[in-house]
Amino acid sequence: MKYIIDYFLIVIIFPIFVIIFPLISLMILIFDSSPIIYSQKRVGLGGKEFSLYKFRTMSVSSDESVHKEHYKDLSSNKKIEPSLTPDDPIRIENDDRITKIGSFLRKTSLDELPNLLNVLRGQMSFVGPRPLVKYESDLYGEYSKKRNSVKPGITGLAQIQGRLDLSLQERLYWDIEYVEKKSFYYDLLIILKTVISVLSRRGAN
């Protein structure tokens, strides 16, 4: 049923994708520059890495080490376990690496539109834990194996709870919750709530 949902949604969204993709590509070229697509290695099903595709939202010269150091700071002297106890949010406040057009794409979640290519390639699903870069995934230690026991998704239970407003511990809690309770109807509910979350821009960066 999960595969049916994925390919049914692709059929519905593809015509929109064909129209919006070139428009966003043109906007990035006009207001920023090339490249248009950003590719990054992410951890997927069974811990296997794959190339995730997104519209580029940061300057070409942006330093990945900034993001890596931020996550190290968030996890410093802490044991990362599933918890709903509020902690430091994941977001990087006032990240000057994000371009003006990139800020718009992130707030509307349009930067993730190329994720559809990953779904078509069977690397992702519409619903599941968001795929993490390896150093993020490694922070979860023993829980990373359970988290990666399902395909990563374009959206997930953590995303409808607050996206980047969550702490590492809260995100892990909701990701594990999804793995343990995943079902056809659960996926439909998450998709519906994702639409509401995106429209309200809740937790967007």
Image (spheres, rainbow, N blue to C red):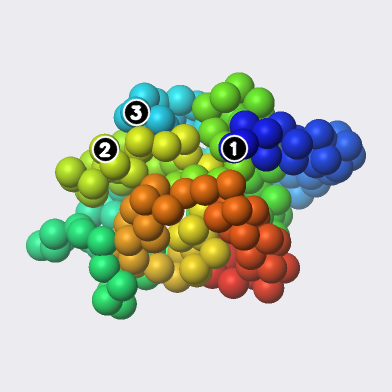
Residue 88 in percent (x, y) is at 31, 72
From the viewer's side, name the closer residue of 205 and 13.
13
* Residue at the spot 52% in from the left edge and 53% down from the top edge: 156
- Residue 24, located in which quarter of the rendered image? top right
Q: Residue 53 appears at what percent x and percent y?
A: 59, 33
Residue 46: image x %, image y %? 34, 28
Question: In terms of sequence position, does the residue under pointer 3 or pointer 2 come before the other?
Answer: 3
What type is the residue that disc 1 sits on? Lys
In the rendered image, which residue does mark 1 sit on?
A: 2
Residue 101 shown left or right of residue 38 in the figure: right
Q: Between tags 2 and 1, which lies in front?
A: 1
Left or right, residue 195 beside residue 98:
right
Which label lies toward us, 3 or 1?
Answer: 1
Q: Secondary structure at mark 1?
A: helix
Q: Earlier in the sequence, mark 3 or mark 1?
A: 1
Q: Disc 2 to disc 1, how far (Cα)?
A: 21 Å
Establish if 72 lies above or below 83: above
Q: Position of residue 12 (x, y in %)?
A: 83, 40
Pointer 2 residue: 145
The image quadrant of residue 30 is: top right
Tell whether 84 sits left or right of 124. left
Say whether residue 194 is visible: no
Q: CA distance from mark 3 to mark 1?
A: 17 Å
Badge 2 density bin: few <14, some 14–19, many ≥20, Cα 10 Å: some
> Which residue position is annotated with label 3?
46
Callout 3 secondary element: helix
